Image: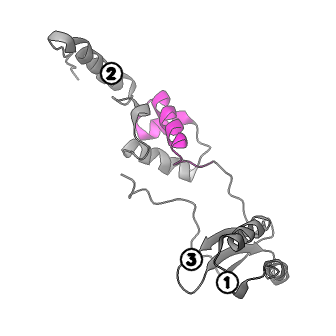
Amino acid sequence: MALKIESYSDKRTDIGILFSARRFLAYLYRLPAYDVTEATAHSMDKFDQAILSILQNDCTRPIAEIADSVGLGSTACWRRVQKLEEQGMIRGRVALLDPGQLNVAVTVFAAIRTNQHNAQWLGRFHDLIATLPEVVECYRMAGDTDYMLRIVVPDIAGYDAVYKKLIQLSGITDMSSSFAMEQIKSTTQLPLNYSL
């Protein structure tokens, strides 16, 4: 591939040469032809999307492997990962544990209704939920249900212990529970096709 070094007359000469040099280096080292640190907080391209797809599947893969898979140099790939972390697109890197082997294979969905809709009660509810490790997800809902919890426990007795802690908080008017019979799908991987 022949590369043409562009130059400009007057004061833009240095800028033109600098831009062409960056393009030349991008070709040689598979680096992006722009500075990734100048990207806006929500900008993302196909390289970022490919990197996130790999990291969502296995965040332990070495940067060199990721870079090779997406067609970037290691340094450029590492910079992009750092930028994605700084932007908050990558919130953390964790190990996914097996609930069956940890004896918490029973999943319960608990729908909670309350007659308290004020900041003080909400604060107390948040504090209580934070103390219960069995509650792995909690959502404030629209509609008939005010809060939806996903709870993991070893058995019905384990759920009953969590239930008794929850109903100690005054203001809960109804709590209905559904036990999952089978897990059809569970993933931590988010769809990335909406991000470009």
Q: Which residue is mark 2?
A: 22
The answer to whether residue 4 is above or below residue 126 is above
Asked if residue 80 is among those painted magenta in the image, a careful observer would answer: yes
Q: Amino acid at mark 2?
A: Arg
Q: In the structure shown, which secondary structural element does the residue marked by tag 2 occupy?
A: helix
Question: Secondary structure of the magenta portion, mostly?
Answer: helix
Q: In the figure, residue 101 lies in which quadrant?
A: bottom right
Q: In the structure shown, which secondary structural element does the residue marked by tag 1 occupy?
A: strand
Q: Quadrant of the N terminus?
A: top left
Pick whichever, 144 or 31, lies toward us.
144
Which residue lies at the image location 53% right of the left edge and 59% below the top edge? 189
| Range of magenta residues | 63-92
Density class for disc 3 (Cα within 10 Å; few <14, some 14-19, many ≥20) is few
Q: CA distance from mark 1 to mark 3?
A: 12 Å
Using the image, tell me which numbered label, if any, was put on residue 114: 1
Asked if the residue under mark 1 is in contact with the one under mark 2, i.e. CB atoms within 8 Å, the reply is no
Name which of mark 1 and mark 3 comes first in the sequence: 1
Q: In the structure shown, which secondary structural element does the residue marked by tag 3 occupy?
A: loop
Q: Position of residue 46 (x, y in %)?
A: 37, 45
Q: CA distance from mark 2 to mark 3?
A: 50 Å
Q: Amino acid at mark 1?
A: Thr
Q: CA distance from mark 2 to mark 1?
A: 60 Å
Q: Nearer the viewer, mark 2 or mark 1?
A: 1
Q: Amino acid at mark 3?
A: Met
Q: Which residue is mark 3?
A: 141
Q: Position of residue 3 (x, y in %)?
A: 22, 20
The answer to whether residue 2 is above or below residue 189 is above
